[in-house]
Image (tube, helix red, strand yellow):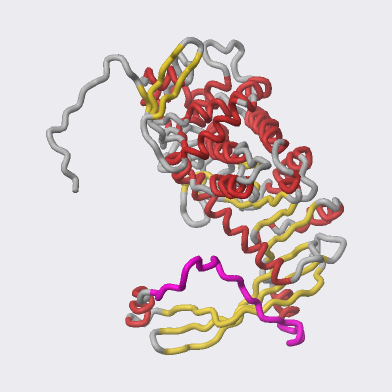
């Protein structure tokens, strides 16, 4: 089928184009939201912005992953592309060494000011959402390791599992996937360190943005009992945290009457649209059985609840416990059964116990989000020389992920007969992986044409997602 032959290449003398034509729509979104002005207003790095303003550097780092860049050095490709510069109306953009030097100029105060600029803009995006959007914000928190092979990076340390590097803390908005908080820390710091202060900052952003309630979620490292009372005192805040299986808690669970337990029925992960298919043979399970490896198999799950007052709290909270019956097998032999307990502390007394468990388990989606920040837009990396400069790099590059979310949130839903379909498109774009989003809406080969007072991006190819793309372009122009 591949019959092309006698292939020749030539350089166009007059027409010029770029491979990432969707960057024009992204820049139009940035201009409409006033992001550049907000950055320049909040962040003061230069005494005299010659030739670049602070926003030029920040957007340069954010646009790099949107155009397929994976490291600082990839900026050089677009810096020498005259068509790309024309597409953004730029005479030049910072080179990689200048971008790295800009990161090194940041202190903690500058990073906080930059995050405040982002929050100001995200609240503008939220203000354009329907009323149902503001029912409840769900804040997930977790730490993640950023390894580095460097030996001279100030602030790096060795983590519990032997990785040298940093251990940033991230707070994300589960509703949209936006990064509401990012704090870089040495690699040996515990996951929950500084989490309470960052949660308070994120709560203020959510309430100022119009959310009526906020749900806090985290694993066992984030059950910060000394802060639960003051969060509970604000009636707008709910929390569901994992809790360590202490011997005292396990004793309480073991002594619960049998009628207190009920079977935990987990919903199906998805609905079969056509008909169930026959599963292929499980090759992995066959190998495990043949080689007599020990394996754990979940037999059943049960859920119960009781009141519990942590030592650092002045009142009792609801403790939901899951009892897992696990069988330990070796080859064909069944060795023994084992009971394990998993605890969740919450101040939500309205939901059923199984709903609390499912809601807590939904926090696992944050692992997918962290994977996108690691490998998708490449924000969780440490290319510069110290803790603060790498923190600044992470915050500025993570802006690419937030721009993707804002791009989706700005899609119009419309009041007409297509409203349901438009809402489904909006949710689909919001949940896209970063690479898929770039391929669908940014990697659009375009010819760049200047006619009169217009800058025209003339599309040179087609993909099935262009109706969504042009719907946003029309909304931005209107």
* 320 relative to 100, above or below: below
Residue 318 location (% of width, % of height): 79, 68
In the image: residue 101, left or right of residue 262: left
Q: Label the magenta part by its dominant secondary structure.
A: loop
* 291 relative to 169, above or below: below
Q: Nearer the viewer, residue 11 or 104?
A: 11
Tell me where residue 50 sits by quadrant: top right
Q: Residue at x 58, y 21 (%)?
A: 54
Whether residue 69 is visible:
no
* Stretch of the chain drawn in magenta: 254-279
Q: Nearer the viewer, residue 172 or 156?
A: 172
In the image: residue 394, left or right of residue 132: left
Residue 55 location (% of width, % of height): 57, 22
In the image: residue 9, left or right of residue 320: left
Quadrant for the C terminus in the image: top right
Mark count: 0
Q: Nearer the viewer, residue 45 or 366?
A: 366
Q: Residue at x 65, y 77 (%)?
A: 264
Whether residue 361 is visible:
yes
Asked if residue 260 is among those painted magenta in the image, a careful observer would answer yes
Tell me where residue 223 sits by quadrant: bottom right
Q: Residue furthest front?
A: 417
Tell me where residue 179 sits by quadrant: top right
Residue 477 location (% of width, % of height): 59, 25
Residue 271 location (% of width, % of height): 54, 67
Q: Nearer the viewer, residue 213 or 337?
A: 213
Asked if residue 95 is among those painted magenta in the image, a careful observer would answer no
Q: Residue at x 79, y 52 (%)?
A: 237
């Amino acid at each position: 089928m591949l019959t092309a032959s006698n292939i020749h290449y030539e350089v166009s003398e007059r027409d010029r184009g770029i491979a990432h034509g969707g960057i024009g729509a992204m820049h139009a979104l940035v201009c409409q939201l006033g992001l550049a002005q907000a950055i320049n207003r909040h962040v003061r790095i230069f005494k005299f912005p010659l030739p670049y303003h602070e926003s030029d550097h920040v957007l340069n780092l954010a646009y790099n992953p949107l155009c397929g860049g994976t490291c600082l050095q990839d900026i050089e490709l677009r810096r020498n592309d005259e068509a790309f510069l024309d597409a953004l109306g730029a005479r030049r953009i910072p080179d990689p060494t200048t971008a790295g030097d800009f990161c090194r100029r940041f202190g903690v105060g500058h990073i906080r000011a930059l995050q405040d600029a982002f929050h100001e803009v995200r609240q503008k995006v939220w203000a354009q959402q329907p009323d149902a959007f503001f029912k409840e914000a769900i804040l997930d928190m977790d730490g993640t390791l950023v390894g580095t092979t460097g030996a001279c990076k100030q602030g790096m340390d060795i983590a519990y599992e032997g990785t040298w590097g940093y251990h940033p803390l991230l707070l994300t908005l589960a509703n949209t996937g936006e990064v509401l908080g990012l704090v870089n820390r040495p690699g040996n710091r515990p996951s929950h360190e500084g989490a309470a202060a960052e949660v308070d900052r994120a709560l203020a952003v959510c309430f100022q943005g119009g959310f009526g309630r906020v749900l806090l979620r985290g694993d066992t490292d984030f059950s910060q009992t000394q802060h639960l009372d003051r969060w509970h005192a604000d009636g707008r805040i709910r929390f569901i945290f994992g809790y360590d299986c202490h011997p005292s808690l396990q004793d309480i669970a073991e002594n619960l009457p049998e009628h207190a337990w009920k079977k935990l029925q987990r919903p199906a992960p998805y609905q079969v649209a056509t008909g169930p298919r026959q599963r292929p043979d499980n090759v992995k399970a066959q190998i495990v059985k043949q080689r007599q490896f020990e394996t754990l198999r979940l037999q059943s799950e049960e859920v119960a609840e009781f009141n519990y007052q942590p030592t650092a709290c002045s009142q009792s909270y609801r403790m939901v416990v899951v009892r897992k019956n696990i069988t330990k097998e070796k080859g064909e032999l069944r060795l023994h059964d084992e009971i394990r307990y998993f605890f969740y502390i919450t101040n939500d007394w309205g939901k059923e116990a199984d709903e609390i468990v499912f809601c807590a388990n939904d926090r696992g989606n944050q692992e997918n989000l962290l994977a996108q920040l690691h490998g998708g837009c490449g924000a969780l990396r440490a290319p510069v020389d110290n803790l603060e400069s790498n923190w600044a790099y992470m915050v500025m590059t993570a802006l690419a992920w937030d721009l993707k979310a804002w791009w989706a949130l700005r899609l119009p839903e419309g009041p007409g007969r297509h409203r349901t379909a438009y809402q489904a498109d909006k949710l689909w774009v919001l949940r896209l992986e970063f690479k898929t989003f770039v391929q669908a809406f940014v990697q659009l080969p375009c010819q760049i044409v200047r006619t009169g007072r217009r800058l025209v991006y003339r599309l040179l190819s087609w993909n099935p997602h262009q109706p969504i793309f042009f719907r946003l372009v029309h909304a931005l122009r209107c």
